[in-house]
């Protein structure tokens, strides 16, 4: 069994990042979502200023990150841009990142269900955190996705 590396959790708004830390986070997202997944789409979509950004760090090294949307009248709080650094995969950081993201959403928006748009091949992974599909499969940027919802409940259980 792979041992989860030690990490610290950092949650902040976009304007609170240093230029260097912001660059590292955005670079990792582009490296994974655009380059690795061969998906040319506007990663810098204009939504980052309205979200909280969660990072898992080992000292100054960015291990993983996610974007946390606040609720709106049409949407529950939402977890997105979930990614683990390619250099740190296979260490259960995706699971740690999701536990932290769910915890942060529950702290910031108590009593709210949580949504996400999952790449379809990750439906079982997100399901292990209590997310259930709420849409049919659809294509987003030529990648199959499904919308998922986690009902209001206690803390996330470890998969």
Image: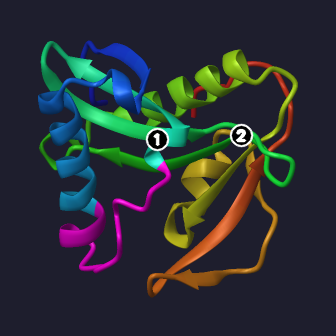
In the rendered structure, does residue 52 fall within the stretch colored magenta?
no
Q: Is residue 43 visible?
A: yes
Q: Is mark 2 on a helix, strand or loop?
A: loop
Question: Is residue 121 depicted above or below 125 in this figure?
Answer: below
Q: Which mark is residue 49?
A: 1
Q: Residues within 10 Å of mark 2 (few under 14, many from 20)?
A: many
| Picture quarter with the C terminus | top right
Is residue 39 within the magenta segment? yes
From the viewer's perspective, tell me whether residue 139 is left or right of residue 88.
Answer: right
Label 2 vs label 1, nearer the camera: 1
Res. 4 visible in picture:
no
Q: Tell me: 159 left or right of 22.
A: right
Where 86 falls versus 56 (above or below)? Answer: below
Based on the displayed image, in which of its 4 quarters is residue 156 positioned? top right
- Magenta range: 33-47
Relative placement, left or right, of 139 versus 70 is left
Q: Quadrant of residue 34?
A: bottom left
User: Residue at image x 28%, y 25%?
Assistant: 17
Residue at x-position 75% and y-position 40%: 71
159 in relation to 79, above or below: above
Q: Where is residue 44 in the image (x, y as percent from the top left)?
A: 34, 59
Secondary structure, magenta segment, majority class: loop
Tell me the residue that label 2 is attached to: 77
Q: Where is residue 96 in the image (x, y as percent from the top left)?
A: 44, 28
Give residue 104's position: percent from left, percent from top. Answer: 60, 21
């Amino acid at each position: 069994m792979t041992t989860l590396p030690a990490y610290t959790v950092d949650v902040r708004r976009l304007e609170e990042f240093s230029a260097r830390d912001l660059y590292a986070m955005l670079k990792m997202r582009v490296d994974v979502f655009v380059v690795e997944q061969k998906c040319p789409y506007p990663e810098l979509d204009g939504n980052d200023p309205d979200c909280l950004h969660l990072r898992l760090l080992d000292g100054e090294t960015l291990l993983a990150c996610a974007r946390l949307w606040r609720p709106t009248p049409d949407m529950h709080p939402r977890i997105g841009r979930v990614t683990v650094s390619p250099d740190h995969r296979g260490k259960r950081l995706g699971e740690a990142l999701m536990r932290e993201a769910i915890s942060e959403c529950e702290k910031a928006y108590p009593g709210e269900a949580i949504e996400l748009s999952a790449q379809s091949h990750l439906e079982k992974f997100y399901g292990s955190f209590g997310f259930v599909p709420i849409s049919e499969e659809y294509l987003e940027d030529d990648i199959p996705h499904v919308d998922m919802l986690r009902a209001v409940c206690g803390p996330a259980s470890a998969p």
